[in-house]
Amino acid sequence: VVTEFDKVTDSVCPFCGVGCQTTVYSKDNKIVLVDGRDGPANENRLCVKGRFGFDYAMSKDRLTKPLIRRDDALKRGDIDMRFMQVSDVFREATWEEAMERAATGLTRIRDEDGGGAIAGFGSAKGSNEEAYLFQKLIRQGFGTNNVDHCTRLCHASSVAALLEGVGSGAVSAPFMDALKSDCVIVIGARPGQNHPVAATYFKQAAKQGTKLIVMDPRGQELMRHASHGLRFKPGTDVALLNAMLHVIIEEKLYDQQYIQANVSGFEALKEKVKDFAPEAMAEVCGIAADVIRDVARIYATSERSIIFWGMGISQHTHGTDNSRCLIALALITGHVGRPGTGLHPLRGQNNVQGASDAGLIPMFFPDYRSVENVDIRGEMEDFWGRTLDPKKGLTVVEIIDAIHEGSIKGMYVMGENPAMSDPDQIHAREALAKLDHLVVQDIFLTETAWHADVVLPASAHAEKLGTYSNTNRQVQIGRPAIDMPGEARQDWELIVELANRSGLDWSYDGVPAVYEEMRQVMASLNYISWDRLEANESVTYPSKPDGEEQWVVFDDRFPTADGRGRIVPADLRAPDEVPDEEFPMVLTTGRLLEHWHTGSMTRRAEVLDAIEPEGIAAMNPREIARHGLQAGEMIAVETRRGTIEAVLRADREVADGMVFIPFCFNESPANRLTNPMLDPYGKIPEFKFCAAKVSAA
Ligand code: SF4
């Protein structure tokens, strides 16, 4: 119990896309307690990360001075930075020297090789205003659309399918609507670990009688609350979902009236799923035909059904196809556009929705307006006063490949950690090492920052003002609770200074001024002024002129060209790399409840790191016995891209033939192993499936 504090700050949680509102208590410029506030997405609740993960901001590891790479420090992709001294690689610098070095390095490449030789990775952990300024700098200042962020690694395929199918990449209804549903499907997601407060709503729904259907190759705690738990074979999502579509069509459980009025592509879907009878797909996906029929009937015939999904759906080379099937389920049953129905890809980071909305993606200006549309580009050129790149830019993994090919030579990375988060890690790190000029702006010397030429110490979430858009499309304000350490500076100010040193002439008198500029080019933020956010603490977009927030969208028509939802039938395709004699296991990766993404924050949070302190690889006890291994021993996990060592954990939730490794541990980096092959539409790598083998270390 904390009895002493000298400051109380209303803010939001820095971790997941649930967007819990918090009250931060601090004393002597240190956070001493975080409590839940009565926000619309959390109603005073917080999970272990939100409640106990705050002290990373006060870590002794915080960057407090700008760093410049020593002339004699070699750049190598295969170094293990855990055993290196900072002073062997970097020297401290003044802000003047660091900013000048950062800007001249990037502008020299731009001027000699063209803007296409520059790329930027922003961050879904930053605010909307930071995301907007970052993409504006890359587009306006460097003349390229090579700007992306970690949405490419989480829901890019979901967004591709949603834009194609329903004309909007955002969720159609908030997760709290589970309480209004008669049937909730959670597929390819582990909300108990990754969206814990959202999971409490799903459990409450089940308790009050809602059918909760949880579908995932791995078991999970939420299945204990479910009416149906379907542990299907990894990589067979389309087989299972097309079989459900088959049942709904065969048994005429679809909503003919809704389809006629609102949907195109139904005939093609009928034709496609003809061959996907549950009896034929049972062997493929590992779920009995009568169970498939049962869940299809429940979903279709319930008055209100809603679907939630996560990266088990999206992180596949057929990730877009997986989402297309989910969209088809909603469209043919009319389970969209009403309270308690809808499509909801659970967003990962606290601002991945907002960063994407703000244009931190290579194909769209803010609000998903195509960079390749002449009229839209003309509007943005008028607004920003510069000629803009007419081609869509490269995505995260494409940028890494372009560095290897030599066409990208300079990068600005803000708050992103591709040296840990990108697939085929050695390949990614070698790319970072190959850059002529890398500027990294962060709060820690991340695995990515070790490769930098210039490191700019920046602000933690608890130190800054900004807006964040959660998975429900709710825009909320994060406020500074403590001061930055040492000479660290605000991220938004650093972007502005880099812009001005790169030949632009920007001037903002604060974060609200940036937000107001965003509103001029983002119709989604119409009627959501800064003052309204301050007054309401949370406003859902889109908002109507009378102030009414649209928690549920598509009630009237879809925001597509013809106002109709579009079904795109999906084929069954195998994962890119399937197990064989040499690599007989399936490797899948993901997150843990206690650790957030690449671990740069949560591994520096004392309580969280104490609960999960070491890199692990989890296997089913049966599989452990078959391999002649013992839980707790060190094992080696190998794929065609590399080998790592990790502590073996027995976990009955992991399927036979599978090994699960979280990607947050730099001593056991899962992404050294993962397959960089991309989904052709969303350009997301296949993190959820590759061939592997395990042995004693
Ligand atoms: Fe933070 Fe997400 Fe936990 Fe809420 S559920 S406290 S937003 S990590």
Image: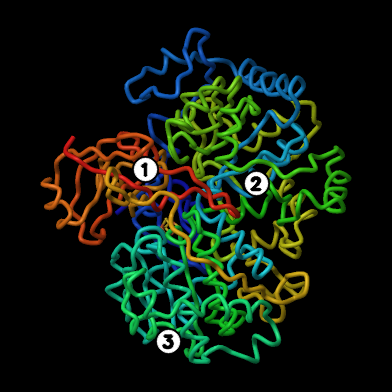
Secondary structure found at label 2? loop
Q: Are marks 2 and 1 in contact (CB under 8 Å)?
A: no
Residue type, mark 1 in image: Cys
Instruction: Decide: few, some or many residues near mark 1? Use Cα within 10 Å; few <14, some 14-19, many ≥20.
Output: many
Q: What residue appears at the point 42 percent right and 14 percent down from the top-left corner?
A: 87
Q: Would you say the beta carbon of the disc 2 residue lies within 8 angstroms of ligand 1?
A: no
Along the line of sight, which residue is nearer the eye, 148 or 268? Answer: 268
Q: Where is residue 467 drawn, in percent x and y? A: 61, 52
Residue type, mark 2 in image: Leu
Q: Quadrant of ligand 1?
A: bottom left
Alpha carbon separation for disc pair 1 and 3: 37 Å
Give the vertical position of 596 relative to 42 (above or below): above
Q: Quadrant of residue 103?
A: top right
Label 1, on which residue? 664
Give the vertical position of 602 relative to 655 (above or below): above
Label 2, on which residue? 360
Q: Quadrant of residue 94?
A: top right
Label 3, on which residue? 298
Alpha carbon separation for disc pair 2 and 1: 23 Å
- Residue 681 visible in the displayed image: yes
Q: Would you say the beta carbon of the disc 3 residue lies within 8 angstroms of ligand 1?
A: no
Q: Where is residue 111 drawn, in percent x and y? A: 77, 22
